[in-house]
Image: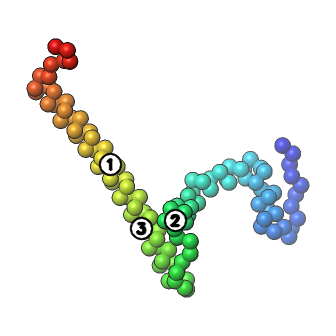
Amino acid sequence: MLDPAPLEDGASPAQRMRHKLPSPEGRALYKQRKAIVEPVFGQLKEVRGFRRLLLRGLSAASGEFNLIALTHNLLKLFRFAADSFRLMKQACEAVVVAVHAEVVEVPAPGC
């Protein structure tokens, strides 16, 4: 790949980004966007429906966003705990079945 021409001193942010993205470092940096914070904002906007803040002022808007972020994180913890509980219950049921099979000799099918 050819090196792009050097940027002018007064380049706009959009021009600087267009210059940076084609480089291998720029592509690697851009790929990280999917793994950092953008999925959270996408989930808040699309799934939860938060398109705009209702309160005015920096401290009020900050508090509102913190509440939204808190509920997002609580939902993640709740889902994780529910999945963990379900998996733990399945493991316990498998152990009970295995122990029961050893205590009460279950004949093999067709015997």
Q: Are marks 1 and 3 in contact (CB under 8 Å)?
A: no
For mark 1, give the secondary structure: helix
The reply to whether residue 79 is in sight is yes
For mark 2, give the secondary structure: helix
Sequence-wise, which precedes: disc 2 or disc 3? 2
Q: Position of residue 34 (x, y in %)?
A: 60, 54
Q: Amino acid at mark 1?
A: Ser
Sequence-wise, which precedes: disc 1 or disc 3? 3
Q: Amino acid at mark 3?
A: Thr
Place residue 12 in its image quadrant.
Answer: bottom right
Q: CA distance from mark 1 to mark 3?
A: 20 Å
Place residue 21 in its image quadrant.
Answer: bottom right
Residue annotated with mark 3: 71
The reply to whether residue 40 is in sight is no
Pick the front one: 20 or 54: 54
Q: CA distance from mark 1 to mark 2?
A: 24 Å
Sequence-wise, which precedes: disc 1 or disc 2? 2
Q: Position of residue 101 (x, y in %)?
A: 16, 27
* Residue at x 14%, y 25% (from the top left corner): 102
- The label shown at residue 84 is 1
Q: CA distance from mark 2 to mark 3?
A: 10 Å
Residue annotated with mark 2: 44
